[in-house]
Image: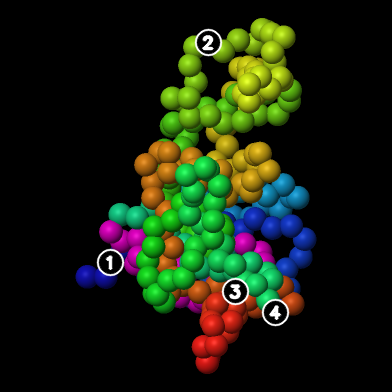
């Protein structure tokens, strides 16, 4: 008996127009998923200049479907034809977040967009690895990332969004909210840094605000925020280094450029 197909949505945040170098592989991948026992439930796209807003809108639309998986495709990356099938196979043992490997757009210094968190809270790029290794990380770039719907459901259950008195909103884990929250209280310390601690007041929104899965905060990209939330809810992040993607610039930056960057200074013949 044929195994029931995996149901996925493609999530494509974008801004501006994409070249044919991107559209042709994207169409080919979507059109032939059924040959890999994958059911494409929907293609979800949102395109404003606010990438976190786009991702949050796409995620909310995904949760309205019956798909199990949301596969993120950035509008400046080319992913292998077999990427979705490979990542589904990698996730078959209960993994809920698994992505491919791609690199920064600097051809002379392509850095893996795959990160490990340091003790001081900063992130460093993944170092060397054996081709095909499946590694646990702390964060990835969001292109070619397969996420199970339980990741977003758990974030929804464990986080709440509050309004900043200074403007805007921010989502917090429920365990980090202690005491009462008021809608009309203030103090002289609001907005002040005292002994290295920022005193910032949050109030209840006038109307309920949906939890933000992705947030641009403290000068960091929205994907870092997402992975921190997911890990806080018990999910682990993996990269399958056999899924090698390209980052579109004036030409594709991929594994060949990375090997040249790493090994050429060592005098290794490639």
Magenta stretch holds residue 67: no
Residues under numbered marks 2 and 4 in contact, where contact means CB atoms less than 8 Å apart: no
- The residue tagged 1 is 3
Up-down relation of residue 100 to residue 147 (above or below): below
- In primary-sequence order, the first of circles 2 and 4 is 2
- The residue tagged 4 is 251
Judge from the rendering whether residue 31 lies leftward or rightward of residue 190; answer left or right.
Answer: left
Part of the protein shown in magenta: 74-93
Residues under numbered marks 3 and 2 in contact, where contact means CB atoms less than 8 Å apart: no
Mark 2 residue crowding within 10 angstroms, few (<14) / some (14–19) / many (20+)? few
Snapshot quadrant of residue 76: bottom right
Return the residue nearer the eye: 101 or 153.
101
Judge from the rendering whether residue 57 lies leftward or rightward of residue 65; answer left or right.
Answer: right
Residues under numbered marks 2 and 1 in contact, where contact means CB atoms less than 8 Å apart: no
Mark 3 residue crowding within 10 angstroms, few (<14) / some (14–19) / many (20+)? many
Point out which mark residue 180 bears.
2
């Amino acid at each position: 008996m044929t195994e029931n197909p995996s149901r996925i949505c493609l999530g494509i945040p974008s801004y501006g127009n994409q070249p044919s170098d991107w559209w042709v592989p994207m169409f080919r991948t979507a059109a032939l998923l059924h040959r890999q026992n994958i059911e494409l439930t929907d293609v979800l796209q949102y395109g404003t200049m606010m990438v976190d807003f786009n991702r949050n809108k796409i995620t909310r639309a995904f949760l309205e479907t019956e798909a199990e998986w949301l596969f993120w495709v950035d509008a400046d990356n080319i992913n292998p034809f077999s990427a979705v099938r490979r990542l589904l196979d990698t996730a078959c043992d209960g993994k809920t977040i698994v992505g491919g490997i791609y690199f920064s757009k600097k051809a002379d210094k392509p850095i893996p967009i795959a990160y490990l968190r340091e003790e001081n809270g900063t992130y460093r790029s993944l170092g060397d690895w054996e081709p095909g290794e499946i590694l646990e990380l702390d964060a990835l770039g969001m292109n070619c990332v397969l996420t199970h719907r339980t990741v977003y459901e758990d974030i929804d259950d464990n986080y709440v969004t509050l309004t900043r008195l200074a403007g805007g909103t921010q989502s917090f884990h429920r365990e980090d909210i202690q005491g009462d929250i008021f809608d009309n209280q203030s103090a002289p310390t609001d907005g002040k840094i005292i002994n290295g601690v920022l005193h910032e007041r949050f109030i209840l929104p006038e109307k309920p605000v949906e939890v933000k899965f992705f947030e641009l905060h403290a000068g960091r990209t929205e994907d870092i925020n997402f992975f921190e939330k997911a890990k806080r809810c018990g999910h682990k992040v993996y990269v399958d280094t056999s899924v090698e993607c390209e980052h579109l610039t004036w030409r594709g930056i991929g594994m060949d450029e990375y090997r040249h960057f790493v090994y050429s200074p060592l005098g290794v013949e490639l």
